[in-house]
Structure formats: C-alpha cells, structure tokens
C-alpha cells in the first residue's frame, strides 16, 4: 500500500511539474516530509526529480537553448552545492517563509503589471540560477524561483520547459552527490520502489505534456503564476 500511494504521488506530481515547469519536488516534498526525515526526503525526491528533468529534455528537446541554460545552470550548480551543506546545520523555516512572501509579492506584481518582462540577459540568468540553486539545495524546491525568472522572460512553452528541465538537472546532480557525501541514505522500501517510481514519473510527464499541448500560449504564463501563488501561500502559512 505504501508503494502504491507513493507511486500515485509521483505520477500526479510529475504531471503538475511538467505543466508548470517547476519539477515534481514542489508537490512531493511537502507530502513526503510528513512521513520521512527531511534529508532522506530530499535525496529520494531529488532522484525522482532528476529523471523528471530528463523526461522534460526528451519531450521538449526542440526547445533547448544552450546559452540560456548555461547562464542559469553554472551559478545554480555552485549555489546548490553550498546550500546543500547548509541543510545539515541551519533551520530553514524562516527562509521558507521569506521565499513564500517573495513569491506572493511577485504574483501580485505580475497581475498589476501583466505586461512585465525580464529581458533575457547573462545577469538575469546568473541571479535566477543562483537563487534557484540555493533554494534547491536547502529545500529541494528551486523550481518556483526558476519559474519566476523564466516566466518573466515570457518564453514559448517548449523553450521554457526544456530550459527548466536542463537547468534543474544541472543543479540536481551536484546537490544529490552532496547529500550522499554528507551521509544521507534512503531506506530499502524507497530504494527498491525506484523501480516503479522512475517509470511512473515518465508516465506523469507524458500525461502532463498532453495537457500542456491543449493550453494556449497566451494562458500559459497565468497558469504558472497561479501555481506560484499556491506555493507561496503554503510556504508562508505552513513552512517545513
């Protein structure tokens, strides 16, 4: 029963993560931390998330833009490694609430200034990559920050999702290595369950792509903003 419930969570989270570009960790981590310690949760969800990043690259490979990926990914890798080490020494409750306020403020601003755009530039990529890497390392949830910057670029759906997947994979790889190097391990149920969960994440991503194909480009940014609002409220009201 435990494996079945987690499998359902993986499929649903993967579908939502594909539609929004956040990655499945934003949905899975709040649920998994109710039953597992945070370090074990971050390692387990991070493994599933890594494969979900790979599925995005395969499903939206026509949208890959290496210049944008590198500008986000390189600073994100450095920030993720440093932040992953903080996980074992610093409480993240205050930082999660700060992130929640930041996301809520951005969504309000977005609705007030709906025409707001960030011009894709090396500076915007460095700032967005570093912030998403930091929050991924500490909380395993850098997708919201990454979505904040990428949605402000107002990119076409395929470019947005392929870029988000590639950046997330670049950030996930070193942070997972850091978790393991710091002594984090997952239990046998979760470990062997990966044989089901990894294919399940692909099924969810494929289903999410089917939903995304039905969403007009004009409404895509609004959907991302709505999910940012939900995440911001959850982090503010119930962090951890």
Image (spheres, rainbow, N blue to C red):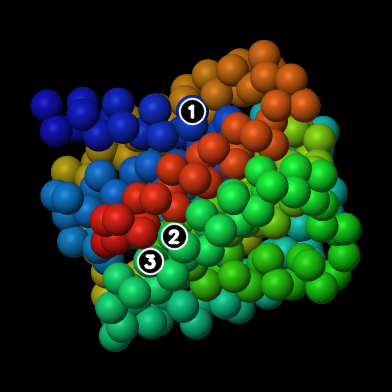
- Lower position in the chain sequence, tag 1 or tag 2: 1
Per the model, the C-alpha gap separating discs 1 and 2 is 23 Å
The C terminus sits in image quarter: bottom left
Measuring from the top left, give residue 93's x and y in whole percent. Answer: 30, 71
Asked whether the viewer can see residue 134, the reply is yes
Disc 1 target residue: 15
- Between marks 1 and 2 in the image, the one whose residue lies nearer the viewer: 2
Disc number placed over residue 100 in the picture, else none: 2
Whether residue 203 sits left or right of residue 117 in the image: it is: left
Disc 3 target residue: 97
Q: Which residue is depicted at the point 17% across and 50% down?
A: 34
Per the model, the C-alpha gap separating discs 3 and 1 is 26 Å
- Lower position in the chain sequence, tag 3 or tag 1: 1
Please say if 134 is above or below 210: below
Whether residue 236 sits left or right of residue 124 in the image: it is: left
Measuring from the top left, give residue 86's x and y in whole percent. Answer: 38, 82
CB of mark 2 within 8 Å of CB of mark 3? yes
Q: Which residue is depicted at the point 39% across and 50% down?
A: 233
- In terms of secondary structure, where does tag 1 sit? helix
Given residues 114 and 64, the one toward you in this image is: 114
Q: Which residue is depicted at the point 82% across and 57% down?
A: 118
Whether residue 179 sits left or right of residue 82 in the image: it is: left
């Amino acid at each position: 029963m435990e494996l079945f419930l987690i499998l359902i969570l993986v499929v649903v989270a993967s579908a939502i993560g594909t539609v929004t570009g956040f990655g499945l960790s934003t949905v899975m981590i709040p649920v998994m931390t109710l039953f597992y310690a945070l370090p074990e949760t971050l390692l387990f969800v991070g493994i599933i998330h890594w494969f979900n990043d790979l599925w995005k690259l395969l499903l939206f490979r026509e949208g890959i833009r290496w210049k944008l990926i590198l500008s986000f990914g390189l600073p994100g890798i450095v920030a993720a490694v440093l932040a992953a080490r903080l996980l074992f020494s610093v409480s993240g409750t205050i930082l999660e609430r700060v992130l929640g306020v930041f996301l809520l403020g951005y969504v309000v601003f977005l609705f007030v200034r709906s025409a707001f755009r960030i011009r894709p530039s090396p500076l915007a990529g460095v700032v967005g990559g570093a912030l998403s890497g930091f929050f991924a390392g500490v909380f395993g949830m850098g997708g919201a920050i990454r979505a904040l910057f990428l949605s402000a670029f107002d990119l076409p759906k395929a470019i947005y999702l392929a870029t988000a997947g590639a950046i997330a994979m670049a950030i996930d790889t070193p942070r997972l290595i850091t978790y393991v190097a710091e002594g984090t391990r997952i239990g046998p149920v979760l470990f062997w369950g990966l044989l089901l969960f990894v294919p399940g994440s692909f099924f969810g991503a494929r289903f999410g792509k089917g939903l995304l194909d039905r969403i007009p480009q004009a409404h895509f940014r609004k959907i991302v903003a709505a999910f940012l609002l939900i995440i911001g409220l959850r982090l503010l009201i119930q962090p951890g």
